[in-house]
Image (tube, grey):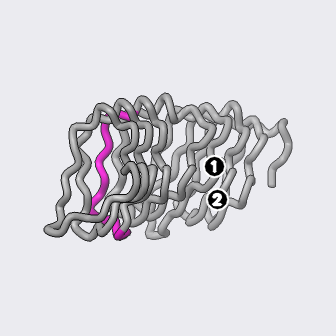
Amino acid sequence: VCSSDLLKSIVLPPNIFNIALRFLANTKITEISIPKSVSLCNIATFRNCVNLTNIVFADGGNVPLYIGGDMWLENTLVTTLVLPARIYKIQGYWKRGSNLTTSLKSIILPDTLEFINTNVFEYCTSLVTVKLPETLTQPKFSGGLFMGCSSLTSLIEISAITTSIGIRAFYGCTSLSGVKMLGSIPPSIEYEA
């Protein structure tokens, strides 16, 4: 763990596989490029990196990538987050405490993404458009996924394999164009979805 608040830059080796819990927390880095060999970038990795504005994950290679978890970007100023095509899972609460809740306007998720956990985009009040990939394999549409996204205007398409929509998935989405179910059997809908 790099706990020094004096650390301002770091170059990660091209053969690193995992970035440990709180690895860069409390450092003064302003940007970072994550090599394509990384498969896991875990909880609170960038917590309290108050000068961090850019995170770029190198694309290419065939290493599946899993990011996020609680406080992943807490107290950062990230305005640019480039997610590679090799990403397959985004853990919930990944942006809690970051400015992404007010700065993120649009996101295109790669077709390699198989799983999005609960509350991933909650209270992204500036988010206007999002396109969910057809590759999602989870039968339950995650609860709280777009909760409080008051500017979201996209038509959200729900996969044919979806059997239920989680609690408050669209709660507070007052500008939403609509939700289109792609399956022939409508999913069950949980409380305040």
Residue displayed at 31% across by 53% down: 132
Please state which of residues 1 and 140 is positioned toward the viewer in this rendering. 140
Q: Is residue 136 magenta?
A: yes
- Which stretch appears magenta? 127-139
Q: Quadrant of residue 143?
A: bottom left
Q: Is residue 130 above or below residue 174?
A: below
Q: Secondary structure at mark 2?
A: loop
Please state which of residues 161 and 64 is positioned toward the viewer in this rendering. 161
Residue 24 position within the rendered picture, expressed as x and y whole percent measured from the top left: 73, 48
Dot 2 corresponds to which residue?
42
Q: In the drawing, does residue 100 fall left or right of residue 28?
A: left
Residue 109 position within the rendered picture, expressed as x and y whole percent measured from the top left: 36, 51
Dot 1 corresponds to which residue?
72
Residue displayed at 56% across by 32% down: 99
Residue 46 position within the rendered picture, expressed as x and y whole percent measured from the top left: 68, 45
Q: Quadrant of the N terminus?
A: bottom right
Q: Secondary structure at mark 1?
A: loop
Residue 82 position within the rendered picture, expressed as x and y whole percent measured from the top left: 46, 45
Q: In the drawing, does residue 102 fall left or right of residue 151?
A: right
**Chief secondary structure of the magenta portion:** loop
Q: Is residue 103 magenta?
A: no
Q: Is residue 186 above or below residue 43?
A: below
Query: Badge 1, how many Cα within 10 Å: few under 14, some, many 20+?
Result: many
Is disc 2 in contact with disc 1, using a CB cutoff of under 8 Å?
yes
Residue displayed at 38% across by 58% down: 190
